[in-house]
Amino acid sequence: MSSWRFAPLERGFESYYGYLGGGEDYWLHGTDTELDFWDGDAPDFSHTCWQQNECPHDFYSANVFAEKAVGVIEGAAQNRSKLFLYLAWQSVHSGGRLQLQAPQDYIDGFNSTVPLVGGTSTKRRELAGMVRSLDEGVGNVSAALSRAGMLEDTLLIFSTDNGKPRRLAPAEQRRFASAQNSAFDLRRRASGRFQREHGLQLAAARHEAHAVRRGCAGRGAGLGRRARQEGTGRRARRLLPRCRL
């Protein structure tokens, strides 16, 4: 991020909780050289933990975000207000120093079902532990929506980030060095770090229940006005008719 005007609070969001940079450690919530975690426009290091094997579960990135999202949902339900919630989990991207990080008991839970890589590496178990934590977070957020009586009137969109890493040939590594930690499509010359549209084809899912039939065009109108202010109104107007009540 090069300027505060690109931060979430300057782009139409009423609240924000998370980090603004990249390469975050799942427990430290920063890098080797700096901490980077924010509650709105104020730094928040209340969940920073240096010894990951001794850190509480609720300090782990996926759990921090899920707990915050549940709080936002409960607040909206209490105030009987509608909401737009953008929840970008860090999982299951590699964390600080490109490591896979998950609570140790989550990793150990796959000892009998996930084999070691090459007979020694626990990387697959670590990834499985990360996926389990993400899965629990999705379940907790969905359950919060259900308890609040909001699930059947909510349009849920679940999408991936930039896919799995791709091992490049030596010549490609020199040419596309920035793609080492992101999926890369040589045919479209794009990866998660390239600003090219349609560079990747990734999985997505949605749960709409009654939300689309009963109407999100009215709720989207405010987003459309905001989008027009940001110079993307034409795209917003194309999208809104698909979201009629």
Image: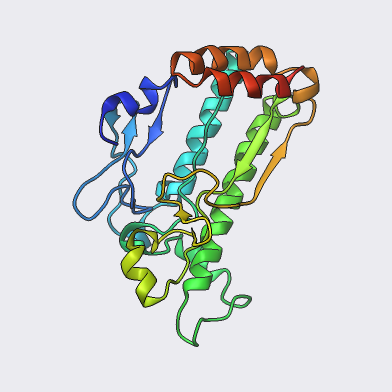
Q: Quadrant of residue 2?
A: top left
Q: Is residue 64 left or right of residue 155?
A: left
Q: Is residue 215 left or right of residue 181?
A: right
**Vertical arrangement, residue 12 with respect to residue 36, above or below:** above
Q: Is residue 184 left or right of residue 239?
A: left
Q: Position of residue 10 (x, y in %)?
A: 36, 21
Q: Position of residue 192 (x, y in %)?
A: 45, 51
Camera-side residue: 34 or 162? Answer: 162
Which residue occupies 59% across, 76% down?
Answer: 114
Q: Quadrant of residue 80?
A: top right
**Vertical arrangement, residue 145 with respect to residue 177, above or below:** above
**Vertical arrangement, residue 5 with respect to residue 118, above or below:** above
Quadrant that contains the C terminus: top right
In the picture as drawn, the residue positioned furthest to the bottom comes out as: 119
Q: Position of residue 20 (x, y in %)?
A: 33, 38
Q: Is residue 114 visible?
A: yes
Q: Position of residue 103 (x, y in %)?
A: 46, 60
Camera-side residue: 194 or 112? Answer: 194
Which residue occupies 50% across, 38% down?
Answer: 67
Q: How is the image coloured?
A: rainbow
Which residue occupies 57% across, 26% down?
Answer: 73
Q: Is residue 112 left or right of residue 199?
A: right
Say how many tags the image has: 0
Q: Is residue 83 visible?
A: no
Which residue occupies 34% across, 65% down?
Answer: 175
Quadrant that contains the N terminus: top left
Q: Quadrant of residue 141?
A: top right
Camera-side residue: 22 or 39? Answer: 22
In the picture as drawn, the residue positioned furthest to the left comes out as: 33
